[in-house]
Amino acid sequence: MVKENSIRLNIGPVHPAMHGVLKLILDVEGDTITKAQTEIGFLHRASEKIAEMRYFSNYYPIMDKLDYVSALNMEILYASVVEKAAGIEIPPRAVYIRTIMAEIQRIMSHLVFIGSFGEDLGNMTGFIWALRERELLMNVVEKISGGRLAPMYICNGGMFYDFPQGIENEILEALSIIEDKVKHEYNAMFTKNQIFLSRTKGIGVLTKDMVKKYGITGPIARASGIRRDLRKVSPYLAYDKVDFNIPVENDGDTYSRFVVRVMEILESIKIIRQCIKDLPAGSSKTAVPWIIRIPKKDTFVKQESSRGEMGIFLVTDGADKPYRLKLRSPTFFAIRALEELLVNIRVADAFVIVASIDPVMGEVDR
Amino acid sequence: MVTLDKLKSGFKGELEVLTEEPKLSIIRIKNKKLIKKVAWQIKEEFDILYALSVVDYTPVFELNYIFSNYRNADSLVLKVNIDEKDFSIDSITDTFNSANWEEREAYDLFGIKFNGHPDLRRILLPEDWPGHPLRKDFKVDDEIRNWTGLDLKF
């Protein structure tokens, strides 16, 4: 029931300040939100139904379009679950290449977050800067895989092509530029900028209890003081062979969520450098037939994607297609917290909070 | 796992342990009416409902509740069967708040009713969508493929 002096505000699904096609229904009194509802499903493409109609090798392009800002993470997750179910071992070089690609994609994804977060605050320079740095890695991914946003690089048993000659030096060059910019220029633009601080500090506080109530994972949970990262808790790929830290902040506000992601970029750079140093020689692919049959079993794999813990529950029945494939997406749980986070704050701050969740609707709606 | 031993002794005859591994244990309960009691026991060790996956083995639907916690990498899969005589099961949202949208999704895509759910509406599909698309008997034809959501004739 809408009260007399309150207005119902429909924002989205198509709105420049919304990330993708998220719709917010806000009850506003003056400038303060009294009730918030979220509506999702505008980008629902029935990915889980499509999986039941595709061979195991033909589903990678669909995984690319789930979280299209970190497509390689999705591909690696799907490859891991199929390989675990079918009992395929991949060579050590493929493990290291996958780790490098996953971390490159994580840096790119977090740079998009920094850019769009700045843009929502009216800081257009930050947006241009972040995309400029992302372009360096985009070019690297294009040289390696041939694609930019949806690379289609990973396949069952490894990846389609090995690294091209001399790409290691290009990656290292790009990383040293990004490290320098993130450490110095971004501090001046964001974390030492008085306007940025007053817009983000103490806004949208997500406590530890709320994180556990809604089942939120990933950088958002780490910004609220929960030290949990699947790369450390249950190491997969080559994460148990490299040395890195998990950045944790305790305040749980939008500023912490920003800082955690910036710190994660620096940790990812550390991981890539170690992986390139230890990159083993040899074959990069186990030969696997295009059409494989997996006996009847249930397989569950979870990995740390850029936005939190992404999981796949795969049910097979001996056929060449999955019987059922369930995608567990992290932002699906985080979006629900908006209904509590947006109450009793200003409308102008609502966009900052939505941006700090960093939703990609392709992954929420599936 | 401590909880697993407690569950085994607490629900003798009703609960069956399929696999017991440190990272992923799979258990099955035979009676769907026990789901709330079992969920209450699981809450002692697991913080969140990680995912709810429904599998259509017509005429039986199998619900896979996956639980996880924030301390370690353990997961627990709880399997419950419901049959076509009664597509409904008790909601566990009062124990696990994170189950809210997952149960709405299962209702949306499979048509399973969750008794006691606070807000059981469709979540991904439009309100007037015919049928439940992830069931095996849902046929994907050209009318579905070319659906735009607009009332237009070309």
Image (cartoon, rainbow, N blue to C red):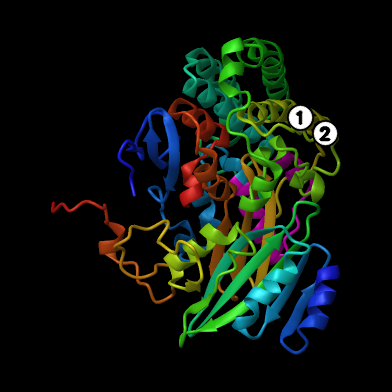
Left/right placement of residue A341 relative to residue B65 reads left
Disc 1 and disc 2: Cα gap in Å?
Answer: 6 Å
Q: Which residue is mark 2?
A: A244
Q: Which residue ends up furthest to the left in the rendered image?
A: B153
Label at residue A267: 1
Eyeballing the image, is A330 above or below B114? above
Q: Residues within 10 Å of mark 1 (few under 14, many from 20)?
A: some
The part of the chain drawn in magenta is A74-100
Q: Which residue ends up furthest to the front in the rendered image?
A: A4
Q: What's the residue at 52%, 42% (across, down)?
A: A338
Chain at numbered mark 2 = A
**Type of amino acid at the residue the image marks with label 2:** Phe
**Type of amino acid at the residue the image marks with label 1:** Glu
Q: Position of residue B70 (x, y in %)?
A: 75, 51
Q: Earlier in the sequence, mark 1 or mark 2?
A: 2
- Where residue B111 sits, quadrant-wise, is bottom left
Left/right placement of residue A111 relative to residue B20 reads left
Of residues B31 and B129, the one nearer the viewer is B31
Label at residue A83: none
Eyeballing the image, is A42 above or below A33? below
The reply to whether dot 1 and dot 2 touch (C-beta < 8 Å) is yes
Looking at the image, can residue A290 be seen? no
Chain at numbered mark 1 = A
Left/right placement of residue B44 relative to residue A26 reads right
Of residues A29 and A230, the one nearer the viewer is A29
Disc 2, SS: loop
